[in-house]
Image: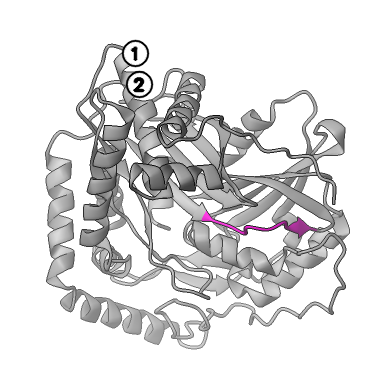
Amino acid sequence: MWVLDSDPRLASAFANLTILDRAPDRDELRTRMLAATAVVPRLRQKVVDGAPLSTPAWIDDTDFDIDHHLRWIHLGPNDLDSVVADLSSRPFDRSRPLWEFVVIDGLPDGAAAMVQRMDHTLTDGEGGIRLSVQFLDLERHPERREPPAPTARPGRTDSNTTDTNTTDSADDPARGLVDQATRGLRAAANVPSALFDMVRDSMRQVATPGRRSSLWTERSTERWFGRSTINLEDAKSAAHQLGGSVNDLFVTGALQAAARIHSAADAPVDELRVAIPLSQRSSGTAGGNAFTPAMALLPAGPMDVTERFTRVHERLDRVKASRGSMGLEGPATVARLLPDSALVGIVGRSAGAIDFVCSNVRAAPFDLYIAGAHLEANYPLGPLVNTAFNLTTMSYRGWLFLGLLVDRAAVADPDALLAAVDDAYSELLAAGGIGTRRTPDLSVTT
C-alpha cells in the first residue's frame, strides 16, 4: 500500500465524516489525541523505504508534532460535502505519520463536523473503529485519568506491532537490510499454491476486457462526496424477508443504482465488476489490515429488484467461500519481490478492471462523544483505488450511514447516482415489506 500510494489514482487513504452537535473542546481533543498516540505508537510513526526484497519499515518520527495532525477550519459559505471531497483527495505528507483529524466548525445551530483521515497502511476501516476507543467516550464529560506518556523510542522501529521487521536498523543498519532480504526470499519460497492461483486469476482478469461499464471509463483525482442513511432494523427486516443479509441488501442497492444509470444512458450492461473487501478481523484486535480483497461479477442487466437480490446473495456466498481464508500476507509476499514500477503497473491495471467498490463497516450501536461533543452521524469515505466510485456503509446508533465517494471524471452526474442509490434502497425496503423509509433525527437531547 505504501508503494501504491505513490500513484494518486491508487492511494488507499480512507476517511470518516462525523457530524457533531457542537465543536469539540480544542484543548481536550489535543490532550486525548496525544494520549492516544502513547497507547498506539503507530500514530507517532512514519514509513521509510526498505532495501530490495524487503518491506518498507515503520520508524518513530523524531519530529512528531500533534498539531500537524489536528486542524481546525471554518465552513463559511462552503458546502460541507464539497469540503469533505476536497480533503479526501489531498495526499498525505509521506515524511510524517499518515493521519489527520480536521474539525470543521460553522455548521447551522452551532453544530460541527470532523473529518478523520487515515492511510490504509496504518489500518483498515474496522481497525480504525477499534483504534477510536482511545479517544472516544460514552458520556459527554467523563471523569479523566492521567494520560499515559509516549513510550516510543526516537529513531527506532516499533517492534511491538504486526510488522515482520523486528531488526533494530538504528543499531545495525547493514544487518537489518540483510535480515529483511533473507526473510523476503524465505517467504517467497513458501508462497502457497493458492496464492499463485489468485495471482493467475487476477492476471487473467487484467488480460480480458477490463471494466464492464461503457460509461465509467475515465479516471482522475477529482472527487465528489454525497451521503444517505438507512434504518438498520428496517434493513435487517427487509433482508431477512428477501432471504439474505444486510450486506446482500447493501450491495444489491448499489448494483441496482448502477444498472439504472446505465439503462437511462442507453448503455445497458449485463454484469459489473465489483470489489468487496471481506473482513478477517478477529475479536479484540485493532490496527493493521485484516481483510481479504475480493472481486465479483454481479448481474446488472434488466430484472426485478427481488431477483437481483437473490442473484447477488448467491454470488456473494460463492465469493466468501472461495476467498474466506485468504488475507493480505500472500499478496504482500509477492509484491515484495517486484520493482515498485512493476507493482504500480500491475495493480493499476487490475484495479482499473473494477467498476466500483462496496464496503461495510460496523461501529458502535450506542451514543459516543469526543472532547465534549456528541457524535450524531458517521459517514465513511472508502478509497477509490482507480475505480468509478466507492459506496461504504457504517452502522452506528441503529442506522446505516452511507458515504458515496465518486471519481468526477468517471461519473458525469454524481448527484444522479446518489439519487439512484436512494431510490434503489427504497425499492429494496419496499420489496422486503417496509412501507415507509425512515430518516434519522440528528437532534440531540442528551
Q: Nearer the viewer, residue 331 or 391?
A: 391
Q: Circle 1 is placed at which residue position?
A: 264
> Residue at position x 26%, y 53% from top?
317
Say if the magenta span includes residue 417. no
Classify residue 382 as left or right of residue 19.
left
| Image quarter in which the N terminus is found | bottom left
Q: Nearer the viewer, residue 189 or 429?
A: 429
- Secondary structure at numbered mark 2: helix
Classify residue 201 as left or right of residue 418.
left
Answer whether labels 1 and 2 touch (C-beta < 8 Å). Answer: yes
Q: Nearer the viewer, residue 214 or 441?
A: 441
| Neighbourhood count class around disc 1 (C-alpha, 10 Å): few under 14, some 14–19, many 20 upward | few
Residue 429, x across and y down, in percent: 46, 34
Which quarter of the picture shows residue 387?
top left
Residue 5, x across and y down, in percent: 43, 50
Q: Is residue 34 above or below residue 385?
A: below
Q: Is residue 345 above or below residue 149?
A: above
CA–CA distance in space, label 1 to label 2: 6 Å
> Residue at position x 79%, y 40% from top?
443
Classify residue 294 as left or right of residue 444.
left
Q: Nearer the viewer, residue 54 or 394?
A: 394
Which quarter of the picture shows residue 307?
top left
Q: Is residue 209 above or below residue 330?
A: above
Give the amino acid type for the residue marked by disc 2 in the picture.
Arg
Give the amino acid type for the residue marked by disc 1 in the picture.
Ala
Residue 260 disc label: 2
Residue 321, x across and y down, in percent: 23, 61
- The span picked out in magenta is 362-370
Residue 215, x across and y down, in percent: 31, 21
- Secondary structure at numbered mark 1: helix
